[in-house]
Amino acid sequence: MDAILGHVKRIPQFPPDLAAMKGGVVTAADAYGSWLRSFYDVRAKWHRRFYRSSGLLVILVGAALPVLTSLDYPGKPVIISLAGVLVAGLTGLRAFYRWDQSWILLRNSEMAVTAAYLAWKMTPGNLPAGDEAATPEQEKSAHVFIEKLGELRQHEARSYFENMAFPAVNGTQA
C-alpha cells in the first residue's frame, strides 16, 4: 500500500512527556504547538485525498454507467449494480463525512495554529525557548500561547458542528 501512496504521513502521536510538562511550560508550549500544527496538517491532507479520490470515482463510474448499460457482455446486471452501489456508497460517504468542509476547516485551523505559533516564537524575548533559564515573561507568554491554541481548537470544533444536521426528536431538532 505504501508503494501506491508513496510516503504517507500518519497522524502524530501525542507526545507522552507533554502532559507531564517535562522540561517546563515553555518547552511544553513549543512541543504542543509543533504537534498541533502537524496534527492539523496531516488530517487536512487525508481529508483532501478522500474528497478528491471519492469525487473522481463518482464522476468516472457515473459517466461509465451509460456505456455499461448499452453494451452486451457476460455479468452485465451484476456489473451495473456494482457500479450503482459504488456511486451511491461514495456519495453517501461524502455527504456523511463532509470531507470537503473538513478539509477546508482543518487547513484553516492549521494556518491559524501556525500563525499563532510564529507570533509566539517571534515575540521579543521568546528566543531561545529553553526552560533552564526561562524568564517569567517567557512563561507567561507560553501560558497565553497555550490558551490561544485551546481557543483555536474550540473554534474548530464549533465550526465543524455548527452546520451539522442532527436527527429530529419528537418533531424538534436535537
Image (tube, grey):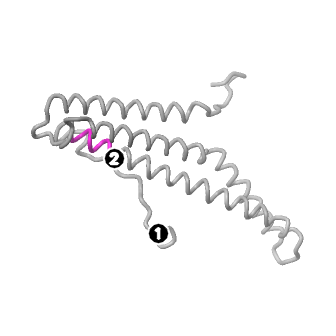
Mark 1 residue crowding within 10 angstroms, few (<14) / some (14–19) / many (20+): few
What's the magenta bit mostly, secondary-structure-wise? helix
Query: Which circle's residue, 2 or 1, is located before the other in the chain?
Result: 1
Q: Is residue 111 magenta?
A: no
Label 2, residues with CA under 10 Å away: few <14, some 14-19, many ≥20: some
Residue occupying the far front of the picture: 124
What residue is disc 1 on? 6
Q: Quadrant of residue 69?
A: bottom right
At horizontal 33% and vertical 29% (from top left) the residue drawn is 147
| Rendered location of residue 123, percent (x, y) | 26, 35
Outermost residue toward the left in this view: 133
Horizontal and vertical percent for residue 76?
Answer: 83, 71
Against 166, residue 92 (above or below) is below
Tell me the magenta residue range. 27-33
Q: Amino acid at mark 2?
A: Trp
| Residue 62 at x, y percent in the picture | 77, 61
At label 1, the amino acid type is Gly
Magenta stretch containing residue 30, yes or no?
A: yes
Whole-percent x, y for residue 20 in the image: 21, 39
In this rendering, position of residue 132 left or right of residue 74: left
**Element type at mark 1:** loop
Left or right position of 142 against 93: left
Q: From the viewer's perspective, is residue 118 above or below residue 50?
A: above
Q: Is residue 10 left or right of residue 74?
A: left
Q: In the drawing, what numbered circle is on residue 164?
A: none
Alpha carbon distance from label 2 to label 1: 22 Å
Give the labeled residue for mark 2: 35
